[in-house]
Amino acid sequence: MEFLLLLILAMMIPMLLMSRKQKKMQAEHDALVASLEVGDEVRTYSGFYGLIVESYEDVVVLESESGAQLKWDRKAIAGKVEAPEESLEETEESEDKGGNGSIPGVTVER
């Protein structure tokens, strides 16, 4: 009987710890989504990138690069997109290495 109780306890402790971590991550995500404002660039869980042009209580209107505007639930937003910080030197180095419009990491032999 003691063995069974010990086994159940050993299985419950990791579940409780994982649950706490998941709740913490959910709270951080909720805070991020609540802090979004008009003008922020975001990515949804489905991979859509857009700019917030209108914001309501639980819905945002995202504008794509083509100018199309779509309504999205705030819960569908995965995160805010930060602009990549690339220094001028790194840009010049990539142009010297053949930055002629090629895709980084893809080599095409001719």
Image (tube, helix red, strand yellow):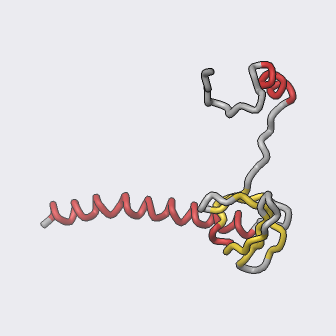
Q: Residue at x 62, y 21 (%)?
A: 110
Measured from the top left, where is residue 17 in percent x and y?
Answer: 43, 59
* Percent position of residue 65, x then y: 79, 57
Q: Give above or below for 87 relative to 18.
A: above
Identified at 70% across, 63% down, the residue is 32
Nearest the viewer among 80 and 13 is 80
Q: Position of residue 11 (x, y in %)?
A: 29, 60
Out of 14 and 35, give the one closest to the viewer.
35
Q: Residue furthest left?
A: 1
What residue is shown at x 75% (from left), y 19% (from top)? Answer: 97
To which quarter of the image does residue 3 belong?
bottom left
Q: Is residue 27 left or right of residue 6?
A: right
Q: Quadrant of residue 77?
A: bottom right
Q: Is residue 73 above or below residue 40?
A: below
- Which corner quadrant holds the N terminus? bottom left
For the point 57% across and 61% down, which residue is it? 25
- Nearer to me, 77 or 28: 77
Which of the two residues, 24 or 102, is positioned nearer the viewer here? 102
Q: Position of residue 93 (x, y in %)?
A: 79, 21
State left or right for residue 88 relative to residue 1: right
Residue furthest bottom as drawn: 57
The image quadrant of residue 7 is bottom left
